[in-house]
Amino acid sequence: MSRNGTSNVGCVALRRSASCATHAILAFLLCVMSSPAWAQAFALSFDDGFDTRKQPDAAKWNRQLLDALSDAEATSIFFPAAGRVNNAEGLALVRAWGDAGNVIANHTYTHPNLNAESISAKDFIADTEKADALLRQMPGWSPQLRFPYLKEGATAAERDAVRDWMRQRGYRPAPPSIDTSDWYYNQRYLDFLSKCTQCELAPIKQAYLDHLWDRAQYYDGLARKILGRSPRHVVLLHTNAINARFLPDIIEMFRSRGWRLIDPKRAYRDPLYRMKPNALPAGESIVWALAKEREYPNLRYPAEDSVYEQPGLERLGL
């Protein structure tokens, strides 16, 4: 049985009943589009990790995220900023991700912005190596790097120095294809809860889901224009309160609209993630960076700054 309920038997019958070339073509398209392989594929990635010294609900939120993934029979890739998790409790939360079958990768130690003038490539590499030393013993470890803020260097010299280090150390880049402003929605969600603990959450949940769907459609459409196809997407999210609360709804939304949730290892085997855009400043979503390199018009930058989301949330009273 296919995803939309059309059986393979039905497809065969439809082909047999086609009395002309037009009907045969329609039958073929129906069979292809009813196959799960036709749907867009996506993997989930989570940045940062919880700081148990500053976030009293860290263990609860961590458990909610892992439970949601388990209930969905899914795994993700997790990029802890090692300095946030460098205590016994924090490392235990990271280990729980690996024990549950998720990939653990590198997001540096202090979360530096490589595009900042105060950060040299040498300093950035040292920071990344410090995180590597702390995290590489974790179950599920993989030498992949997610750049903080998705910034990969303001100059070609910075960008290439880090790329050379990665090549020498056997690291692979791990950019997302779909960037989101979940960090900003999380700020608004926590502010909302602080003012009204008994308020109905449905409006902010719907606004957040609408945002994620809008971003998925935007980046998938951009990929189709740049690549001529829909790649295996990787969605950027963060370990935060809003995702701990609504991750089951996020997964259900994508699945109900025909998107397949896949393993991140499979997603990162897509040739898209082996491409190295030359646009400067370097970074952002890999799809966005390729569009920038090819001078695609009307790209907004920074791609997911809060300025783009604030007016809509304020119109909703959120």
Image (spheres, rainbow, N blue to C red):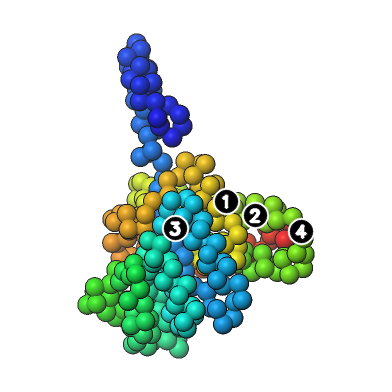
What SS does tag 1 mark?
A: helix
Whether residue 114 is visible to the viewer of this picture, yes or no, is no
Specify the amino acid type for callout 3: Leu
Give the number of the disc on residue 199. 4
Q: Residues within 10 Å of mark 4 (few under 14, many from 20)?
A: few
Q: Residue at x 59, y 77 (%)?
A: 55
Mark 1 and mark 4 lie on one chain; the one further toward the N terminus is 4
Check disc 1: other Cα within 10 Å, few if <14, some if 14-19, many if 20+.
Answer: some
**Res. 294 mark:** none
156 relative to 311, above or below: below
State the image quarter where residue 6 is shown: top left
Lower position in the chain sequence, tag 3 or tag 4: 3
Does residue 35 appear in the picture of this structure? yes
| First-in-chain label (1 vs 2) | 2
Q: In which quarter of the image is residue 187?
A: bottom right
Q: Name the residue under label 2.
A: 205
Mark 1 or 2, closer to the camera: 1
CA distance for labels 1 and 3: 14 Å
Q: How far apart are marks 4 and 2 (CA)?
A: 12 Å
Q: Mark 1 points at which residue?
A: 249
